[in-house]
Amino acid sequence: MLIKRPADIPSSQITPPAIYRRRREIIKAAAAGAGLMMGGGSLLMRSAKAASETAGGERIPNPRPSPLSTDEKPTSLDDVTHYNNFYEFGTEKTDPAANAGTLETRPWTLVVDGACESPGEIGIEDLLSGFTQEERVYRLRCVEAWAMVVPWVGFPLGDLLKRFRPTSKARYVAFETLLDPDQMPGQRRSVLEWPYREGLRMDEAMHPLTILATGLYGELLPNQNGAPLRLVVPWKYGFKSIKSIVRIRFTERQPPATWNRMQPDEYGFYANVNPAVDHPRWSQKRHRVIGEGLFARKHETLPFNGYGEQVASLYSGMDLRRYF
Ligand SMILES: Nc1nc2c(c(=O)[nH]1)N[C@H]1C(S)=C(S)[C@@H](COP(=O)(O)O)O[C@H]1N2
Ligand SMILES: [Mo]
């Protein structure tokens, strides 16, 4: 390597996606050619057919721009769909695009229950037709120190939650990803606790900037981005934005969240983007913007990812060093 970097940052975090991807392809081709089938063997086998089987590609008619959109330049579709975190399909940034073709997103049912007057379930087709589709452009930043601007298609999570009539006991909202190791081969390894789980406080969940995304770039979500339905919370680090959701539950107590349970000192429940609180192993003051290249200057990270005016009041009076 020409570039010196701290030893504890995996190369996947700092290499520009295009170069990184090419390197992975070369490594995979070499491995396949040599007949190597080690740990990731079954994942490698699937990669060839995966790309054409993703749910993405179907146009969503006339999504309207949301007034909450940023006017920053969106990250390219190629980067948005090939530089992902989705451990159900592998732990490398290129794994989800290569392996997520095994996920079946039709039929798909979302169960909503817990502290509410009308618990029930809703099929994905009803969800897609029943909610106003507004195109929203959000800056989404990940704790691993990169940033993207994604033109999500989605609707406010609160619009859905209200229909199930949460009671006064509903203080939090818990989310769960599908659990099915046949469709999500990464779940055969215990890199995380499965299913992936996340949670929000009720007021965070009802905030208009918290959306359920069903598409991006005007098309249905590709599997690797969390088809058919994923959360987007733009003022929080990426891991809060849980993908491929099958269950939402209203709870009285703070629900368990996957990364928080794994490493509670590194990943807080709130996970609000905060340049003043470093991750124990790296600074969170600056980040790279995907698409600008490795040599571009890093950007200053803003409190709440630049959405402080809209969301800071949710946390007034809270010690954000303690509740990170
Ligand atoms: N079910 C599930 N959801 C997930 C993850 C995951 O591994 N599994 N990774 C999270 C992390 S760490 C990030 S940074 C974002 C990445 O979203 P993107 O690939 O669409 O950019 O998804 C989040 N949602
Ligand atoms: Mo992340």
Image: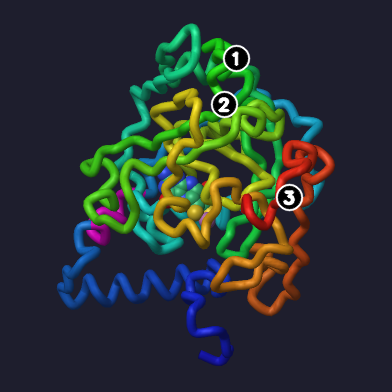
Q: Position of residue 155 (x, y in %)?
A: 63, 26
Q: Is residue 122 above or below residue 274?
A: above
Pointer 3 or 2: first along the chain: 2
Which residue in the structure is indicated by mark 1? 162
Give the residues in magenta.
43-50
| Residue located at (31% from left, 56% from top) | 47
Residue 129 in view, yes or no: yes
Q: Position of residue 297 (x, y in %)?
A: 75, 75
Is 39 positioned to the left or the right of 277 in the image? left
Q: Position of residue 94 (x, y in %)?
A: 43, 61
Amino acid type of disc 1? Lys
Q: Is residue 244 above or below residue 15?
A: above
Which residue in the structure is indicated by mark 3? 304
Q: Residues within 10 Å of mark 2 (few under 14, many from 20)?
A: some
**Callout 3: helix, strand or loop?**
helix
Amino acid type of disc 2? Arg
Q: Position of residue 218 (x, y in %)?
A: 61, 34
On residue 183, the disc is none
| Residue located at (48% from left, 14% from top) | 126
Label 3 to label 1, Cα distance in Å? 25 Å
Label 1 to label 2, Cα distance in Å? 14 Å
> Disc 3 vs disc 2: Cβ atoms closer than 8 Å?
no
> Disc 3 vs disc 1: Cβ atoms closer than 8 Å?
no
Residue nearest the viewer, comparing 216 with 52: 216
Q: Residues within 10 Å of mark 3 (few under 14, many from 20)?
A: many
Report the magenta stretch's main SS. Answer: helix
Which residue in the structure is indicated by mark 2? 171
Question: In which quarter of the view is residue 200 placed?
Answer: top right
